Image (cartoon, helix red, strand yellow):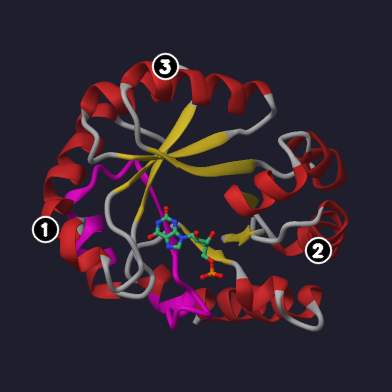
Amino acid sequence: MSRIILALDVYEKEKALKIARETRDYLWAIKINWPLILGSGLGIVKELKKETKLPIIGDFKVADIPNTNRLIAKKAFEAGVDYIIVHGFVGRDSVEAVMEEGKTIIVVEMSHEGAKQFIQPITDELIELANELNPFGVIAPATRPERVRYIRKKLDRSIKILTPGVGAQGGKALEALKAGADYIIIGRSIYKSDNPRESAKIIWEEIENGVKS
Ligand code: XMP
């Protein structure tokens, strides 16, 4: 099984479906975010599933009061999303409201520079929250493998680690996996490539060879 999640951050439906079709053989799942939903509408979820038969992760970074979080999650799961990404800093009740609706992934640290400002100082508490709630997974930064290693050590073994930041943001797939990530999330390095299928295949092979060696 692949360890690659494609971050399909394009606006247009036809473009999204084409890239998904071309790359599906090398993916575990497809992650969709606001650019695609705002550009193509929520109906894209079922179309992507029909084309690829892959799980869909809704990266909506839900961060509201419990009632609004629940309303958002309900709609997303109804639309066919299999997992939702939610922020943990809004507190336990808001996260639980999403978890009651379906499989959830909690952000415990982000991959960009600004994450050091507010998120990284509370990562320990976010890990604790995840350990208490036992979600499907957490998000940790592939741009900082040492932080992935730290998070893996503190996090319950049953919780998966998904790491964005590979490629365009400078993170390396194998480093993130060796640090303890279960899946890597890649966007621009695949969807902006002249040949998305070939780019996905190269990363897939790098992982296959690297994990064996
Ligand atoms: P690129 O093009 O940088 O796309 O490969 C990365 C994708 O992942 C999202 N992203 C994050 N999501 N926590 C998250 O929950 C993060 O730290 C993070 N960093 C990147 C980004 O929005 C894009 O869809």
Crowding at label 2, few (<14), some or many (≥20) Cα neighbours within 10 Å? some
Tell me which residue sits at (44%, 33%) in the image. 104
x%, y% of residue 6? 64, 60
Mark 2 and mark 3 in contact? Answer it, CB < 8 Å.
no
Residue flagged by tag 1: what amino acid is it? Answer: Pro
Residue flagged by tag 2: what amino acid is it? Answer: Ile
- Residue 83 on the magenta span: no
x%, y% of residue 122? 13, 51
| Above or below, 48 relative to 91 | below
Tell me which residue sits at (33%, 60%) in the image. 110
| Above or below, 171 relative to 84 | below
Residue 8, quarter of picture: bottom right
Task: Report the Cα–Cα distance between label 2 and label 3.
Answer: 32 Å
Q: Is mark 1 within 8 Å of ligand 1?
A: no
Residue 100, quarter of picture: top left
Residue flagged by tag 3: what amino acid is it? Answer: Glu
Between 139 and 63, which is closer to the camera in this rendering? Answer: 63
Task: Report the Cα–Cα distance between label 1 and label 3.
Answer: 28 Å
Residue at label 3? Answer: 100
x%, y% of residue 185? 53, 62
Residue at label 2? Answer: 19
x%, y% of residue 28? 64, 53
Crowding at label 1, few (<14), some or many (≥20) Cα neighbours within 10 Å? few
Magenta highlight range: 148-175
Q: Earlier in the sequence, mark 1 or mark 3?
A: 3
Q: Which mark is residue 65?
A: none
Q: Which mark is residue 121?
A: 1
Quadrant of the rendering where the N terminus is positioned: bottom right
